[in-house]
Amino acid sequence: MTFTQSKKNLTPYIIVPAVLVVIALAAWLFLGHRFEFGKPIFTFDGELRTIGWQSTVNLTFSDPQSGLSKTELVLIQDGRTYPLSALTYPSGKVKTQKIRMVLDPAKIKVHEGPATLHISATDCALFSNSISVDKPVMIDFGPPQIFPLNTQNHINPGGTCVVAYRVSEPVTMTGILVDSSFCKAYPISLSGKPAFIAYFPVPMEAGNRPVNIRIVARDQGGNESSSTVPYLLLNKTFRSDKMMLSESFLQRKMPEFQAANPQLRGKTLLDTFIYVNTQMRAENFKTIQGLSAKSEPRQLWNDTFLRMKNASPMALFGDRRTYIYGGQQVGESIHEGVDLASTTQAPIEAANNGIVVFAGPLGIYGNTVMIDHGFGLFTLYAHLSTISVKSAQTVSMGSVIGSSGLSGLAGGDHLHFGMMVGGQFVNPQEWWDPHWIKDNVLRKMEVGI
């Protein structure tokens, strides 16, 4: 056999594999994403166990390889099927699809009781990989019933109110709406039965306009209900005062703020004060609200809150201040605590048991300590000269947390003492009164139903 004949005989063995390789490469280039066997997946945002009026379902389908071909949601009850969603997608174009549905079971004529949510998806793979899941759900149209445990609530403008109540079923949200402001309620046990307790602030302007106070609750099906909180509003007036800004005060205090805040350097002393009294005050309050957004879900405090020893009140809660400079009004503020003064650098004690959530400098408040007493109740100690506690430290009533001073926007050595409920400042004087605490807090938890 000649070399030429041998070459001809081997040609098919070379060409055929080469053609197959080319075909396979072309198939991979054009159809490669379809040669896979992974099934589509789906996830819920949160859990879906109960479907109620206008329940929202947030579902995400995904297939990162060949992409989605179609998805479907069907509700099944008593052998009948109720289509909810059926979508098809361009081949290989959609890898992830989020579906948000508002389910209104009344429109599809289902009834209260068990049902099944059928979820399915198919991808664009050559062999149409698919997933199909049946998820048991409960249809629930009835909103939770609310049973207030307190029939009388005597409240003061700027004060605190405490209510206790029960609900008829497990809830995903409950608390108090004061006009449009929401205050979270915390689960407790009263007389051996589950209940909720909520501390909430009464607006200072409650004496000038009606205030709508309601208990609200939402169950696992999204059904909501509310119940009016009955109250008797007591009379409370707040003082107004004009405060003259002296040149010596501005020269003594404003350079401190300019040194700590580069954006204030170069401003006049008066412009610095205006910035501090407006924008910085608002920023500091926002920080305080953030610190008070998370509270221990239990009562840490016990007995009457302590007042600074041997101290005279210099300013009261709710004082409306108008600042005057050179005969002109240059600013306003509402005093949201009580100023107490005794001796220079007097020891400052924790007003009650709690956990320190902040210890450090805080703008207009100067060196500040904040203590969480549970259930959304906090105390604030401002203008300190020294701080002797750290954040996350547990403190007991009467333990020394620092010394009084004149840090921040303070003209003299004193303690600015504040109390917060539901993210708002309230009048501390109520919490210094053992009779008020007994009648308005402790007695409301003495229930037998």
Image (cartoon, rainbow, N blue to C red):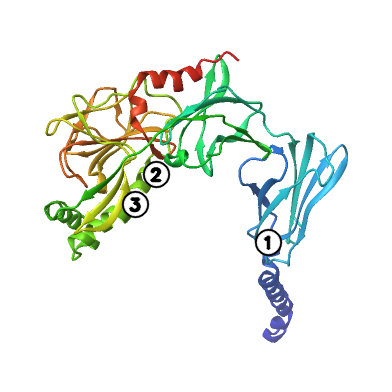
Which quadrant is the N terminus positioned in?
A: bottom right
Residue 339, quarter of the rendered image: top left
Label 1 to label 3, Cα distance in Å?
A: 47 Å
Report the residue marked by disc 1. 67
In percent of width and height, residue 32 lies at 67, 66
Nearest to the observer: residue 116 or residue 252:
252
Q: Earlier in the sequence, mark 1 or mark 3?
A: 1
Q: Is residue 367 above or below residue 373?
A: below
Q: Is residue 179 visible?
A: yes
Label 2 to label 3, Cα distance in Å?
A: 11 Å
Label 1 to label 2, Cα distance in Å?
A: 42 Å
Report the residue marked by disc 2. 290
Q: Earlier in the sequence, mark 1 or mark 2?
A: 1
User: What secondary structure is marked by label 2?
Assistant: helix
Q: Earlier in the sequence, mark 2 or mark 3?
A: 3
Nearest to the observer: residue 177 or residue 168:
177
Nearest to the observer: residue 6 or residue 45:
45
Nearest to the observer: residue 226 or residue 355:
226
Question: What residue appears at the point 17 percent right and 56 percent down from the top-left corner?
Answer: 259
Q: Which of the labelled discs sits on residue 310, or is there none?
A: none
Question: What residue appears at the point 29 percent right and 22 percent down from the top-left corner?
Answer: 397
User: What secondary structure is marked by label 3?
Assistant: helix
Q: Is residue 153 left or right of residue 360?
A: right
The kind of residue on which mark 2 rests is Gly
Which marked residue is nearer to the observer: mark 1 or mark 2?
Answer: 2
The kind of residue on which mark 3 rests is Glu
Q: Which of the labelled discs sits on residue 283, or is there none?
A: 3
Q: Is residue 127 visible?
A: no
